[in-house]
Image (cartoon, grey):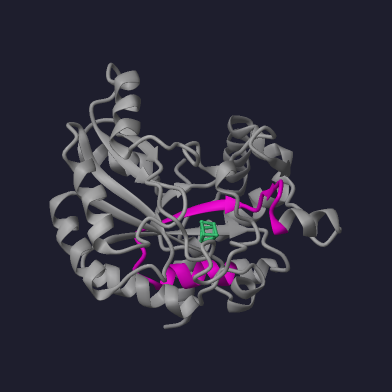
Amino acid sequence: VEHYRSYRKYIRERFGRAVLTIPVNAGLSCPNRDGTKSVWGCSFCNNQSFSPVWDDKSSVIEQIERTISVVKKRFNAFIVYLQPFSNTYGPLSVLSPIYEAILTIPGVVGLAIGTRPDCFSEEKYEYFQDLAQRTYLSIEIGIQSAHDETLSLHGRGHSMEDFRQCIQSLSTRGISTIAHVMLGLPPETEQMMLTTACEIASLPLTGVKIHQLMIIRGTLMHTWYLQGKVECLTLERYAGLLSKFLSYLRPDQLIHRILADSTVEKGLVAPLWSAEKLKALQFLNIFMDKEGTLQGSQCRKNKIKNG
Ligand code: SF4
């Protein structure tokens, strides 16, 4: 049974072969860290924990070629993922040569760019419109929650309206957009998280990455956790939330990920089930089988109810 529309499957069908995503570090910064918006970053942020390339100082081209040389017997198509920090932050004269150089590497069929909603300009929107006509392009934007009070508490430095406008601007130019959301951010209730799912369903987003809250050593969230102000989701609770969250999304939205993972070595403090990705995924799949989870099932009903 397919509980959700898998991005992995979609990409395989679209390109007619397996496509490997290669995460790279373009050495860019983030306005929420360099002092433009804040120097603290988001309460949960520590790129070390979620990006395997967070401290890679070699050039983007070197990073890609290194990976390709290892996997070239198994893969001949690649999507390069600019992952750590905000990869549309900075002048276009600095950014576009990075993107363009990546596209000249044989085998690269697309680009995924991770960023924030406040790192765009008219000039960048126009550039990305052109880029999307030349390659497979998806722009991944962190929102985490659709509630301004949550965004403010966790130091995001932008509003839900900033996100909405950014998604509208990108999608009207034919650019695929992916939202990153987090379940379990304090003090959100289940109702609040499901409202976020409905907001995502109402926007022209092509895909979603869903994560559980992880406590990472050295973050503000870690301090709150040590002070007893934050509780982590159990795997059982996460499975229940994920299942409901999926049901409120639109059925056509691609699900890129249903789980985040890290390790104690990379700073993971809790929940420790996040370090056992395969086991956790297996649990989630069994849970969804039992629940009969179906992406979009509540979204459709809502539409009918609302007329
Ligand atoms: S926007 Fe991203 S990189 Fe910047 S502080 Fe927040 S989570 Fe970290």
Is 238 covered by the magenta stretch? Answer: no
Residue 277 at what x, y percent from top left? 60, 34
Q: Which is more toward the observer, 30 or 293?
A: 30
Residue 75 at what x, y percent from top left? 28, 24
From what the image shows, is residue 204 above or below residue 5? below
Residue found 82% across the figure and 62% down from its top: 229
Q: Which is more toward the observer, 82 or 206?
A: 82
From what the image shows, is residue 112 above or below residue 65? below
Residue 78 position by quadrant: top left
Q: Bounds of the magenta span?
A: 194-220
Residue 231 visible (yes or no): no
Q: Which is more toward the observer, 227 or 61?
A: 61
Residue 127 visible (yes or no): yes
Residue 17 position by quadrant: top left
Residue found 74% across the figure and 47% down from its top: 234
Residue pushed farthest bottom? 307
Is 207 covered by the magenta stretch? Answer: yes
Residue 189 at what x, y percent from top left? 70, 68
From what the image shows, is residue 241 above or below residue 257? below
Residue found 58% across the figure and 37% down from its top: 281
Specify the quadrant that holds the C terminus.
bottom left
Residue found 73% across the figure and 68% down from its top: 187
Q: Is residue 239 left or right of residue 205?
A: right
Residue pushed farthest top? 73
